[in-house]
Image (cartoon, rainbow, N blue to C red):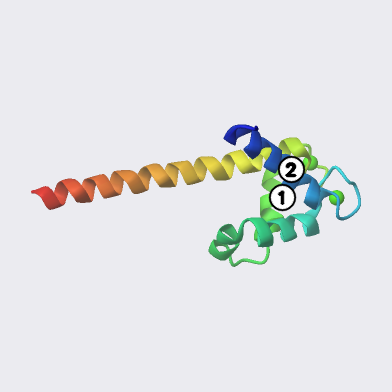
Amino acid sequence: MATRLETAMDTLISVFHSYSGQEGDKYKINVSELNKMVDEELPGLRKKNKDPKFVDSMLKKIDIDKNGEVDFKEFLSLIAAITLACDRYFEDYMKETEKKKCQSKK
Ligand SMILES: [Ca+2]
Ligand SMILES: [Ca+2]
């Protein structure tokens, strides 16, 4: 049986290919595939960023080799960046709740 981490890695690979394979180059995510991915897989991120140009500027930031598309390596750095942001948010949230707990004790 696969471990949680193996399952997570498997999921990342299959999510990438389910979007990269929709149009043009099968192994790269173009801007319309990226838009679809954000809509379907990152609805929270989409909700926070109402700007219609949001995905375009996200693509520019993660497109390290500047070919206008997202390869698997670039996709992984995007996921890592979002995960880090979530983790930091989670840490801040935990600290806040701790603080509140401490304050209410006084
Ligand atoms: Ca593609
Ligand atoms: Ca690229």
101 displayed left or right of 54: left
78 displayed left or right of 15: left
Which residue sits at x=33%, y=45%?
94
The circle drawn on residue 63 is: 2
Q: For mark 1, give the secondary structure.
A: helix
Instruction: Say if mark 1 contacts mark 2, CB within 8 Å.
Output: yes
**Residue 37 sits in quarter:** bottom right
Residue position for label 1: 59
**Residue type at mark 2?**
Asp
**Residue 76 sits in quarter:** top right
Please give the count of numbered marks on the rendered protein. 2
The circle drawn on residue 25 is: none
Gap in angstroms between the C-alphas marked 1 and 2 = 6 Å
Mark 2 sits near ligand 2, with its Cβ under 8 Å away? yes
Q: For mark 2, give the secondary structure.
A: loop
**Residue type at mark 1?**
Leu
